[in-house]
Amino acid sequence: MRTGRPIAPLSLTGEEREILGNWARRPKSAQAMAQRARIVLEAAAGNSNTSVARKLRITKQTVGKWRGRFVHRRLAGLLDEPRPGPKRKVDDAKVEEVIRLTLESTPVAATHWSTRAMAKRCGLSQSTVGRIWRAFALQPHRVEGFKLSKDPLFIEKVRDVVGLYLNPPDRALVLCVDEKAQIQALDRSQPLLPMRPGQAERRTADYQRHGTINLFAALDAKAGTVIGEFHRRHRAIEFRNFLETIDASVPDELELHLVLDNYATHKTAAIKRWLLRHPRFHLHFTPTGGSWLNLVERWFALLTERQLRRGIHRSARELQDAIRAFLDHHNRDPKPFIWTKTADQILESVARFCKRISDSGH
């Protein structure tokens, strides 16, 4: 005659058996979940709690616990229940207050909130304010710049320039042309203190000027190579000389499409007459205030970051030699900047930005 408490029958559907089998076999499953799945599978095979416990080397109480939870709640019963833990010290209302104050107000006698000021205002700790800001991606200490072009032909120019990048014409070269004017040859007033373990390189805040130079550059949008030329000034005559350098550097059978900004020296009568004599040159102007469309600006940023910002140059000639060395090194192993956004994507992004400005009431 059977003794002890009766055991509730346990049966599995085909779907449940497949899920439990996957949990039990997957090598990356949590071992606790894999063990619970094996308990249920053994019990469903008709084995008693004692035999299951002996086979899996666990206690009968553990087998009974998970068998009972599966009978009453099925697969959901094998999941871990929320642990009690301490109660929250910062409720939703306090979190909302921090976010509202951050977005809609400024502290007294300051332009933006700091963690200390916000903590004092809301009666919280600095670390709590920091966690709330991180959770909602708020960074009051940061500011970024922007400028919306007022060019009446903005849309047409964006489509024209981006079209050159994404679908360049056959038997033609797309060159992004611009000047980096008034590059200063700077030397620090005192010798540098070199970097050492635990200490960054140090330099004085003041400096001495030793002249300036102007760099004219044309970036091949496809190959990534750069044609560069130095001039003492950046007038129309120097720009015409640079166009002649480009003309001599590019094979005659190729058409030339130049992406330029709206600088006055690019549109003088002398330049227009020169272009009439050289019909293979086609100029494409970026929108006013839209020099970010010109890929050569990205190369100028690379030059500034790697050579100019921390460079020491005691004469204009020394500065010119340093830039020429950077240019030659770049051209030996050029890496083109890849343009990815279509004109429609850019215009949609600008439209969303304009809507944000309109909605903010500015």
Image (spheres, helix red, strand yellow):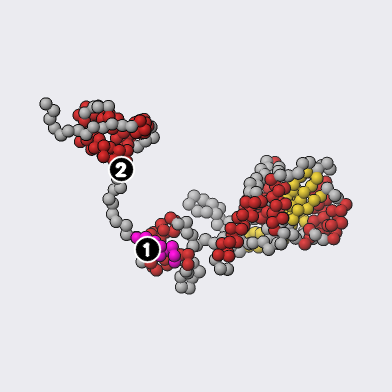
* Residue at 82% from the left image edge and 54% from the top image edge: 241
- Which is the main secondary structure of the residues drawn in magenta? helix
Query: Where does the magenta region start and end?
Result: 90-101
Q: Is residue 343 above or below residue 14?
A: below
**Residue 80 percent across, percent down from the top left:** 30, 43
Task: Based on the picture, tell me whether residue 94 belongs to the magenta stretch.
Answer: yes
**Residue 105 percent across, percent down from the top left:** 47, 69
* Residue at 50% from the left image edge and 62% from the top image edge: 141
Q: Which residue is mark 1?
A: 94
Q: What element does badge 2 sit on?
A: loop
Q: Nearer the viewer, residue 50 or 209?
A: 50
**Residue 114 percent across, percent down from the top left:** 45, 64
Q: Residue furthest bottom?
A: 109
Q: Nearer the viewer, residue 310 or 76?
A: 76
Q: How many marks?
A: 2
> Is residue 220 in view?
no
Amino acid type indicated by mark 1: Lys
Q: Looking at the rendering, in which quadrant would you find the C terminus?
A: bottom right
Task: Based on the picture, tell me whether residue 343 belongs to the magenta stretch.
Answer: no
Q: Marks 2 and 1, Cα distance to the nearest angstrom?
A: 30 Å
**Residue 243 percent across, percent down from the top left:** 81, 52
Q: Which residue is mark 2?
A: 80
- Taking the image as shown, residue 219 lies to the left or right of residue 47, namely right
